[in-house]
Every structure is written in C-alpha cells, then in structure tokens.
Amino acid sequence: MMSQFQEVLKQSGLHPKPAGLVLQYGTAGFRTNAKKLDHIMFRMGLLATLRSRKTKATIGVMVTASHNPEEDNGVKLIDPMGEMVTPTWEGYATQLANAEQEDLLTALKDVIEKEAIDMSQEADVFVGKDTRSSSASLSQAVMDGVSALGGHSKDYGLVTTPQLHYMVCCQNTKGKYGDATVEGYYSKLYQAFIQLTKSVLNRTDDQKHLSVDGANGIGALKVREMEAHLKKELQISLFNDGSKGKLNHQCGADFVKVQQKPPTGVEMNPGERCCSFDGDADRIVYYFIDSEGQFHLLDGDKIATLISTFLKELLTQAGVDLKMGAVQTAYANGSSTRYLEDTMQVIVRCTKTGVKHLHHAAQEFDIGVYFEANGHGTVLFSKAAEEIIQHLAEDANINDERKRAARMLQNTINVINQTVGDAIADMLLIEAILAIKGMTIQQWDSIYSDLPNRQLKVKVADRRVIDTADAERRAVSPAGLQDAIDSLVKKYRKARSFVRPSGTEDVVRVYAEAETQESADDLAHKVSLAVYRLAGGVGGEPKQLL
Ligand code: NG1
Ligand code: ZN
C-alpha cells in the first residue's frame, strides 16, 4: 500500500496540475481545451481504479469531447452496468481534479477512507478514445494513473463512446449482454438487424441506401468497420470520414441540429435519407431536402416518436401489456410532446438535461424510450419485460402474428444499445423500422410538424448565478429573469422559452419555440438580452445570434 502511494506521488509529478486551475465534472464529465487535461486524465485513472475496487467490477474511462471542437478533449467514467457514475463519485472526481499537486495524496486517501476501499482488491479499467489528435497521449495518462495505483487497464484504442459502455457492461455481466469485443458488438447488432429486416420483401436499392455524415470522427471509422457485416442490406455512402475535413467542423449531429442546416461535405439529392453522427457517435439526427430544396430535420424527438410508435404497435400485435413511457428534456419540441401524449397516449416524463437523468427516468417503465432533442437516446427494457418477450417468442401455443411481433421485439432489444445512446445502434433500428413499415423519410417527417425553434448562447461572468427548477423549465434566480421571460413569451403565439447554464460550455443556453421561425428567433434573441442584462453578461451586448 505504501509503495502504491509512493508510485502515485512519483507518477503524478509527470502529470502535474497547473496551479490554480479549477474544473468541474459536468453533464458529460470533464471537458475543456486538451492542453489543460493531462493531470485530469492521470487522476481519473486513479479514481477509476478506486471505483473498480469499490464496486469489485470493471470500470470504463472514455477520452473524448464528443461534439466539441477538435482542440478540446474530455473524459467520462463508466460504471459497471455501462451507466454514468453516481453523483457522490462525480464529487470525488471534482475533488481529485482540483487538488493542488501537494494535496493530491490527501485527496486520494480521503476518498479511500470515506468509501472504505480495500486497496488489496483487484482493479480493472477499460480505456477508450476518440480520433482527436490529443486523445492518444491523454488516454496514456489515464492508464498511467491506473497502473500507479496497481490496477490493470485494457486499452480498447479507438472506439465510440457507446462501444466502450457496451464493453464494460458485457464484461461485468459475464457475457450475458454480449462479447466484450468490438467484433462481438458488430456481430450482435448486425444479426439483430438482419433478423429484423429479413421478412421485408422487395426492398429497392433506394430503400436500402443511406448517406452518413461521420463528423470526421470515430463514428466514420466504425461505420466502415461494420459495413462488411451488413451484407448490403444497408448500403451506406459515408461522408466526412476524417480523410480531409476537421472533426465536427461544419458537420456532425450537433452542427446540423443547432444550425438547422445540412452539413458541408455531404452530397444530398432531393428525398434522400441522410444522417449525421456526432464526434464520439453517441448522437444521431436524420434529415433530407425536399424537391423544393427545403431542409427537413428529424431530430431526437422525431426518432423517439418513430421508435415509440413501432414498439407500441408490436406490443399490441404481440398481445402483451407492458408499461411504455417516453422521456424527454425541456429541449423537446412542444409538438413532439403533444403528439406522444395526445395522439399516441404514451406517458411522457421531462427531466433535466444530461443522459443520466433521462436514463434514470426511463428505468421506471417496462419499456422506456428516452431521447434528447439533439439525438442522444436509446430504449431501456426492464428485466421483467425482456423475460415476458422472450417467453412469448418461444411460446409454441400462440398464433403467427403474435409470435412474429414477439420476435421483432426480441430483435429490437438486441439491436439497441441499452447502456447509452448509440448512433450506430439507433441507425440500425431506425433503418429497420422504416423498412418494416415501408415508410419513406418524408412520411416519417410528416407524423407531426415541429414548432419552429431557436437555440442561442449567452456569455455571462458566472453562469452559476442561474438556478433552475421544474426540470430546468423555470429560472428561480437571478431575481426577475423568469418574470422577464414570462412576459416576453406572452407576446408570441404557441411560444415557450427557457434558459439554463450549460454543463459542458461556459455559457448560458437559451431556447425558444413559437408558431413561426421569425417569432422563435425574435423571442430567443430577446430572452438572450434579458439574460445578458439580469445575469451579468460579458463580452459586449449579444447583437448577433450565436
Ligand atoms: P449542456 O452543455 O449541458 O447543454 C450538452 C447537451 C446535452 C448533453 C451534453 C453532453 C444540449 C442543449 N445540451 O449539454 O443534451 O448531450 O451536452 O454531451 O444539446
Ligand atoms: Zn457525443
């Protein structure tokens, strides 16, 4: 034990913390300019080792800054079942990250003591990274941290975030969820996809074709790897594959969603299905241009609706009564919420932004479909629901229609990545649903019409002055802000607006929706000015929409 601490001391000298630097474990772990992260990575290696000893299970550490610029990087810890770490451990992460060099051992020992960690336990950590140029040395720093504390790390190298979540879950469930290898991941997903689509006869090449924007990131590499398995049942044209463009620059799911326009680098013909991944392939959005050249976005809300409709129909056909719910955040388009509740009669819950909140809420249902509007989402099936579906699929005494539906539900369970939102898995499920329902992207799009909306960012001196309640839909501080928003919202038809401090960027986010795009833009702009005025805006009045 003594020697472990000496090793930590020695090694941490090679990964020194810049004095005074303070970072917070936010919505998506630590995320900032890559140059500031070496010590964070080393320390997260230490923490993951402790977490592994505490849980007596394998822990994951993913090095990525997702949709953020190439210059940034970040790190996220993955708990044994593939979920995000608990708030207490997020607190430890922040504590360890911010301890000055000379206080590191004290901070470390503090966690060991509070959690009563047996330091003689084995520790296993799976490490993965995205394609950023800084990721190689940063993931090495994580592994240095693991070995300094006497843990074992396994380097998965370049993987998507959801792939690493999947590996961790497979490892800790002793293969029940699948094999903890990239090959095992592809084989589970593509087999389920082939099973789902095999009954669909006469699919044309057009129906099998999909254009994918890989955001010049890891998703592009992994789509390439998987393509061979798909046996031409899905024919992918891959754009922004990283061979020339810069990661997430003018492309990727976040760009398309926020800018509401097509990415650069993708050849689009009218009516053709296209989708964009983000920089670590845990988000996906679909879109197309119509014959008049107009752009149509099918975001996480439209995806959730498509999947919920499909599952509800299958449940009816299979004749099983399972409680299904949809989970959204305040960013969900108002039309989607109305459609799910009123037309589909699905229970809808709204949570705070951040996957862990959605994931948690989705666990309350037999089948929980959760999606953030930005395209991060998945479906969770309770253990009981999985068992019921499995029994039914194997039941010799039911009719063909029920059996077919039960088998489709079973394959849906297998194609989806239940550990976390997964662009590749979601893409396969969406493609299968469209094929099975014989639906074009236009038909999918016309299920309901989005309310025009706008997202803006405002820079303030300290974004923590904004405090929210009611799943972030109301600002309780600073004083007067919510009143200002309320009186602005009243001036527009079908309007809604809210503000919240970002958990991944040093900005306040503003969201507005209204009956027309002009109104949504105007409302978002006016709310931004109110934030600027009442929450200590910096950097000159925000004249231009960010
Ligand atoms: P912040 O920066 O807290 O808004 C963003 C996304 C989240 C989530 C995280 C993690 C929006 C409005 N926010 O969080 O939904 O995906 O990044 O990547 O899209
Ligand atoms: Zn991401």
Image (cartoon, grey):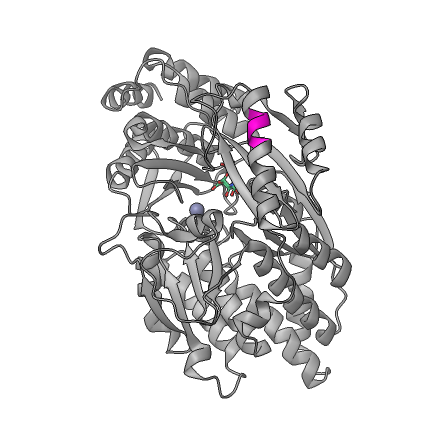
Q: Nearer the viewer, residue 53 or 443?
A: 443
Quarter residue 213 falls in? bottom left
Residue 128: percent from left, percent from top: 34, 45
Residue 465: percent from left, percent from top: 57, 20
Tell me if residue 72 comes above or below residue 179 in the rendering. Answer: above
Q: Nearer the viewer, residue 139 or 523?
A: 523
Q: What residue is at 66 percent from the left and 66 percent from the top? A: 309
Q: Nearer the viewer, residue 53 or 25?
A: 25
Quarter residue 446 falls in? bottom right
Residue placed farthest to the top in the image? Answer: 102
Prevailing secondary structure class for the magenta stretch in the rendered image: helix
Residue 132: percent from left, percent from top: 28, 43
Residue 352: percent from left, percent from top: 62, 38
Whether residue 135 appears in magenta in the rendering, the answer is no
Q: What residue is at 65 percent from the left and 62 percent from the top? A: 448
Q: Nearer the viewer, residue 388 or 61?
A: 61
Residue placed farthest to the bottom in the image? Answer: 202
The span picked out in magenta is 527-531
